[in-house]
Amino acid sequence: AQSVTQLGSHVSVSEGALVLLRCNYSSSVPPYLFWYVQYPNQGLQLLLKYTTGATLVKGINGFEAEFKKSETSFHLTKPSAHMSDAAEYFCAVIPWGAGNMLTFGGGTRLMVKP
Amino acid sequence: GAVVSQHPSRVICKSGTSVKIECRSLDFQATTMFWYRQFPKQSLMLMATSNEGSKATYEQGVEKDKFLINHASLTLSTLTVTSAHPEDSSFYICSAPGQGNNEQFFGPGTRLTVL
């Protein structure tokens, strides 16, 4: 079965510092890959996604992620953290042939220090 | 973009009562909707797939008689938590897939607290 691993349930960075949230998937066939953000007591908002084509994907709020097939990874980055980036981030996949069914990673809580 | 709404956003009920949560796709049709449960500080766990015009598909370990799902129309799915107990307290989120590009649109969630 497909699994998604997010290394680090909590990540703390200083405002202005680089944000790096890690995501690895287990699949011999690259799935569709997503990053979502969740603010407290709210639903999920799509940050970015990879389906096909360019492996470096740019999303909203200055985030980007790079699909690396050789590493089965889809890490999320942002050059400079803002206080407003503090939230829960979820990596998710749709395995090949699974229709629209998402499998989520465990989530990473990003904390931004002033 | 596509919008999914949920109602209510928050509900508190007594143990033993039933609670209905609605999920609506506001500007698009959804033959399929997904229901997730999220416990505090945890990820989303898929509970079931709601199918318009047919029975829902439940994930392993989810009691279909306790979590009743009805996909009444192409824009509405409901989740009824029957005989709720404190351990059912959770954040319930629905989603509906968009057209073609494998994206899902999520509702804002419903916080259920069972006393």
Image: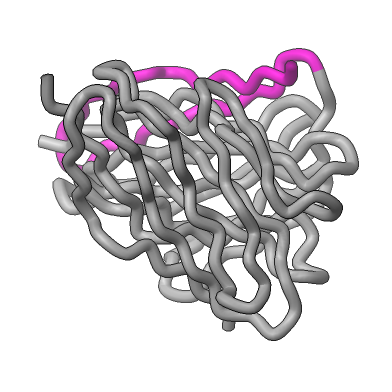
Q: Is residue A32 left or right of residue B28?
A: left
Name the image quarter holding the C terminus of chain A. Answer: top left
Tell me the quarter of the picture where residue A58 sits.
top right
Tell me the quarter of the picture where residue B94 sits.
top right
Q: Is residue A114 left or right of residue B90?
A: left
Q: Give above or below for B113 relative to B3.
A: below
x and y percentages locating residue B59 in the rendered image:
53, 68
Label tally: 0
Q: As rendered, which of B89 and B41 lies closer to the eye?
A: B41
Tell me the quarter of the picture where residue B40 sits.
top left
Q: Is residue A84 magenta?
A: no
x and y percentages locating residue B88 in the rendered image:
25, 49
Residue shown at 56% from the left, 79% from the top: A26
Q: Give above or below for A35 relative to B27.
A: below
Give the residues drawn in magenta, as a range.
B1-27
Residue shown at 39% from the left, 32% from the top: A38
Residue shown at 68% from the left, 42% from the top: A57
Q: As rendered, which of A94 and A65 lies closer to the eye?
A: A65
